[in-house]
Amino acid sequence: MSVVERIARSQEPNLPQSAVPYTRTVTKIWIAFFILNGSTTYLLWQSGYFHAWSLYTGFISYVLMGLLFAGEWLYRRHYKRKHSV
């Protein structure tokens, strides 16, 4: 069971089987985001761009995370209507 599926089932215990592939895809997207976010943070630090690292870790990464969260929330509403979930 994927992380997103566990969260979805905590809110909706009778999650339809048709929603499971969607939750797996969302989990993969979040994993990719966190890998890219961690890699960017590491590369900025190792390259010595401490000002850019500080800006990225203190602001930009949170904005990107918020955009991903909001985008997924909007898409989920569309998906639920389209697939009657």
Image: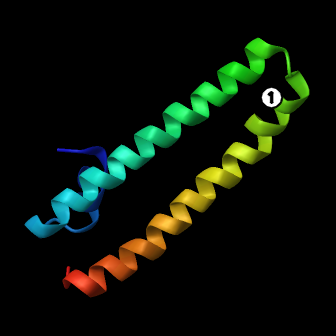
Counting every numbered tag in the picture gives 1
Q: Residue at x 76, y 23 (%)?
A: 44
Q: Where on the picture, by quarter, is residue 42? A: top right
Query: What residue does disc 1 label?
Result: 53
Q: Tell me which colouring the rendered structure shows.
A: rainbow
Q: Is residue 56 left or right of residue 75?
A: right
Which of these two is toward me, 47 or 34?
47
Q: Secondary structure at mark 1?
A: helix
Q: Find residue 81 and report its horizontal and vertical position in percent.
A: 29, 87
Q: Find residue 5 and report its horizontal and vertical position in percent.
A: 24, 54
> What kind of residue is marked 1?
Trp
Q: Residue at x 45, y 70 (%)?
A: 73
Q: Where on the picture, by quarter, is residue 23? A: bottom left
Q: Quadrant of the C terminus?
A: bottom left
Q: Quadrant of the N terminus?
A: top left
Q: Is residue 37 left or right of residue 28?
A: right
Q: Residue at x 28, y 80 (%)?
A: 80
Q: Find residue 28 and report its horizontal and vertical position in percent.
A: 35, 44
Q: Residue at x 69, y 20 (%)?
A: 43
Q: Find residue 77 and report its horizontal and vertical position in percent.
A: 38, 79
Q: Is residue 10 left or right of residue 36?
A: left
Q: Is residue 64 in view from this perspective? A: yes
Q: Is residue 15 in view from this perspective? A: no
Q: Is residue 42 above or below residue 76?
A: above
Q: Is residue 15 above or below residue 29?
A: below
How would you rate the neighbour count of disc 1 (Cα within 10 Å): few for under 14, some for 14-19, many for 20 or more? many
Q: Is residue 5 above or below residue 83?
A: above
